[in-house]
Image: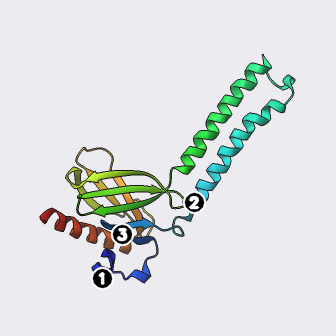
Amino acid sequence: MHALGQLGTIDDHHWDTLQPRPSHAGYCVRETDGEFRHSSIKETLLRFIGVMFVLSALVQWTFPNANFVGDPMMSKSLLSIAFALIGMAAYRFAMKGHRAEIRFDGKSRTIVLCALNRRDQQKGARKLPLRDITSIYVRRTDMAAGKAALRIRLKSGGAELTALRGDLAEVEAVHALLCSKIRKAQQG
């Protein structure tokens, strides 16, 4: 039985918005595909828009020179550069990952926050040693009814980090388990 089954409040077969996963050093929880389908659709749409902008950088060279103001070569060159940069920026943003995953490693006393793209590939990870964390709490106020976010407040006083989003009961269960595991790691 993995660590999330130890809590006993939600059994393994009833997870809707969060997905527990085995981990060699502790445990891992990620947002599910189905619940955050809107993120996947946005990601696909942004990638398509990015590709279309890059293609438009090439297609605009086929237009007649009379359609461009001033020097047509300079106008086409500047438009190509602008379209290509906008397209690459949109594509890169779409590929950065919009679902979250949190991993806790009791041995190294770190929490790792990851962004996952729609193919479950990790796109960026941030390691947070427990000594740098002020608090971990569940936030309900800016979420839809019945939803919550697991938030992390750092000692550096910067912006708070959202670790997970999901159903209130599931986020509270992960929060309770995370807090108990942190207490055990700090005592041991």
Task: Return the residue nearer the eye: 120 or 8.
Answer: 120
Hey, what amino acid is under mark 1? Answer: Gly
Q: Tell me the number on the disc at residue 40.
A: 2
Whichever of callouts 3 and 2 sits on the residue coming sooner in the sequence is: 2
Kind of element beneath mark 1: loop
Residue at image mark 1:
8
Image coordinates for residue 92, horizontal then vertical, percent:
56, 44
Depicted 22 relative to depicted 142: above or below = below
Name the quarter where the N terminus is drawn: bottom left
Image coordinates for residue 61, horizontal then vertical, percent:
80, 30
Query: Dot 1, how many residues are within 10 Å of its Cα: few (below 14), some (14-19), or many (20+)?
Result: few
Residue at image mark 3:
171
The answer to whether residue 141 is visible is: no
| Cα distance between the residues tagged 3 and 1 | 14 Å
* Residue depicted at 69% across the width and 39% down the height: 54
State which mark lies toward you, 3 or 1.
1
Task: Return the residue nearer the eye: 71 or 145.
Answer: 71
Kind of element beneath mark 3: helix
Query: Dot 3, how many residues are within 10 Å of its Cα: few (below 14), some (14-19), or many (20+)?
Result: many
| Cα distance between the residues tagged 3 and 2 | 21 Å
Residue occupying the far front of the picture: 24
In the rendered structure, the answer to whether residue 114 lies left or right of residue 51 reads: left
Whichever of callouts 3 and 1 sits on the residue coming sooner in the sequence is: 1
Hey, what amino acid is under mark 2? Answer: Ser
Q: Quadrant of residue 188?
A: bottom left
- Say whether marks 3 and 2 touch (CB < 8 Å): no
Image coordinates for residue 66, horizontal then vertical, percent:
86, 23
Query: Dot 2, how many residues are within 10 Å of its Cα: few (below 14), some (14-19), or many (20+)?
Result: some
